[in-house]
Amino acid sequence: EGPSLILGSICIIAIALAMVRWLNWDSFGLYWAAQATVTTSRPPCQRLLLTGALVGCQGAVFAGMQCVMLLFARSLVLTNPLQAADWMCPEDDTMAVIVGRALIAISAIVGVVLFALSANGHFLGQDYMMRRVSKALQMDFSALDPDGDGWVRWDAAFSVLPTTLGIWVDWWNVKAFLINQRAVVYASELRDHQPCTHCGEHHSPHEKIMRA
């Protein structure tokens, strides 16, 4: 039981890290912005081909992260201290069980806290979080974190609550999820030269960024 619990805690840590990165890399927002750019800047045949490819990639990412979320939820079952199990190993692994249960409980708590912070947008746009995806895509996302200091944004508390209900408030979740900043930066980096029909500025559609 002890080695199994230790292995389970390692799995929870790996799954939590993957989940946090996915939530803060905003892959869906980038895909929606790319689709909007393709729609206004490509001829019909290329538009259909690229839109299909983007939708396929978006579906693959969604399916993969659903599997990760399911694995994380199933892994939390191992943290139940009252769960009884019969193990066939004849050796005494009491210390391994104690270490394993302590490690898996700490991993689960840290994972849930990181998930809650990520869901509320506390890490969204931070330079250390976007550095790898910025390098991979050859895009500059520094405008999402203009000050460049700090590890957590504390102006995004409980922003997931109105978002879950489909309510958008300018000073609350719109500000927390950087809706306008993401729309402007994505349009600039994707070279979307089509101005907005309402304000005349260059930005990706806000409704698509909200949907992401």
Image (spheres, rainbow, N blue to C red):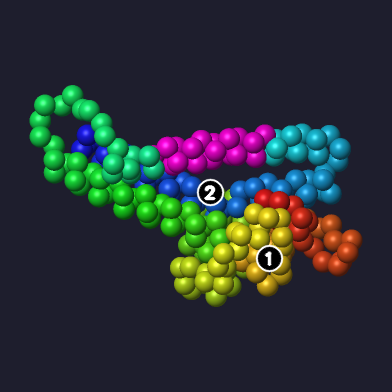
Which residue is found at the position 43% from the left and 53% from the top? 112
Distance from Cα at disc 1 to Cα at disc 2: 20 Å
Write down the residue under mark 2: 22
Highlighted range, magenta:
56-75
**Nearest to N terminus: mark 1 or mark 2:** 2
In front of the other: label 1 or label 2? 1
Q: Is residue 134 magenta?
A: no
Q: What is the secondary structure assignment of the residue under circle 2?
A: helix
Q: Main secondary structure of the magenta part?
A: helix
Which residue is found at the position 75% from the left and 45% from the top? 35
Residue at the right extreme, as displayed: 197
> Splitting the image into 4 quarters, where does residue 169 fall?
bottom right
Residue at the top extreme, as displayed: 88
**Percent coordinates x, y for residue 153 in the rendering:** 52, 69
Q: Amino acid at mark 1?
A: Val
* 149 up-or-down from 180: above or below: below
**Viewer-side residue, 123 vs 100:** 100
Write down the residue under mark 1: 174
Q: What is the secondary structure assignment of the residue under circle 1?
A: helix
Q: Disc number at residue 43? A: none
Which residue is found at the position 81% from the left and 58% from the top? 193
Quadrant housing the N terminus: top left
What is the crowding at mark 2: few (fewer than 14 residues within 10 Å), some, or many (at least 20)? some
**Viewer-side residue, 31 vs 85:** 85
